[in-house]
Image (tube, grey):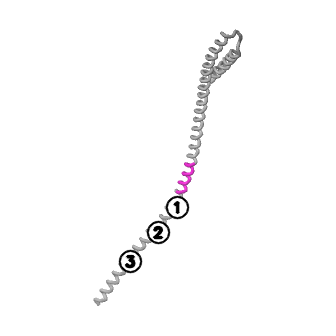
Amino acid sequence: MENMEVIITEIKKIFEDNKNFKEKIEIYESNLKDLINMNEELKYKNNELEIKVKDLEEKNNSKSSKLIWENTQNIIKEKDIEINKLKKDILYYERQNLIKFKENIEVKEVKDVKEVVEKKPKKSKKSKIIINKQNDIDDLEKDLLTIN
């Protein structure tokens, strides 16, 4: 009988252990289900966030492109203004040099004309050329004054 009681206690012990394991397994299964559900929710939220990030990236790219385009246009306008100013400066300096060059030629021609006039009493063609060149210089000076 003693043997029987030992066996019965052993069986009771095994039964109790079995019951405890079953409860633990149920808890683990419940936790596993919860984890699976949370994992699915996180996947769904992750997909939503990825979509939002893509949308934001597209908006950012379009804004960046627009800003780059506007900046490029502004830079082009500024450079055009600089180019126009430089063109005017070049024209101004070219005309100044032309005037100086013509003045030098005139002075030389005037000396030549004086020598010719002293030798010949008639008017020469050179004096007419000097008069015409003087008119050209006056026109150039007027142009220069209008530019500035």
User: What residue do we see at 61% from left, 17% from top?
Assistant: 108
| Dot 3 and dot 2 residues touching (CB under 8 Å) | no
Q: Where residue 122 sits in the image (x, y, percent)?
A: 71, 10
* Label 1 to label 3: alpha-carbon separation: 37 Å
Numbered tag placed on residue 33 in the rendering:
2
Numbered tag placed on residue 19 in the rendering:
3
Q: Residues within 10 Å of mark 1 (few under 14, many from 20)?
A: few
* Main secondary structure of the magenta stretch: helix
Q: Where residue 5 sits in the image (x, y, percent)?
A: 30, 87
- Earlier-in-chain disc, 1 versus 3: 3
Question: What residue type is disc 2 on?
Answer: Lys
Q: Where residue 90 sits in the image (x, y, percent)?
A: 59, 28
Residue 12 higher or lower than 34, as above or below = below
Question: What residue type is disc 3 on?
Answer: Lys
* Label 3 to label 2: alpha-carbon separation: 21 Å
Residue 116 higher or lower than 30, as above or below = above
- Earlier-in-chain disc, 3 versus 2: 3
* Label 1 to label 2: alpha-carbon separation: 17 Å
Q: Nearer the viewer, residue 131 or 15?
A: 131
- Earlier-in-chain disc, 1 versus 2: 2
Q: Nearer the viewer, residue 44 or 1?
A: 44
Q: Nearer the viewer, residue 52 or 103?
A: 103
Residue 73 higher or lower than 53, as above or below = above
Numbered tag placed on residue 44 in the rendering:
1
Q: Secondary structure at mark 3?
A: helix
Q: Is residue 57 inside the magenta stretch?
A: yes
Q: Residues within 10 Å of mark 3 (few under 14, many from 20)?
A: few
User: What residue do we see at 29% from left, 89% from top?
Assistant: 3
Q: Nearer the viewer, residue 99 or 24?
A: 99
Q: Give the number of marks.
A: 3
Q: Secondary structure at mark 1?
A: helix
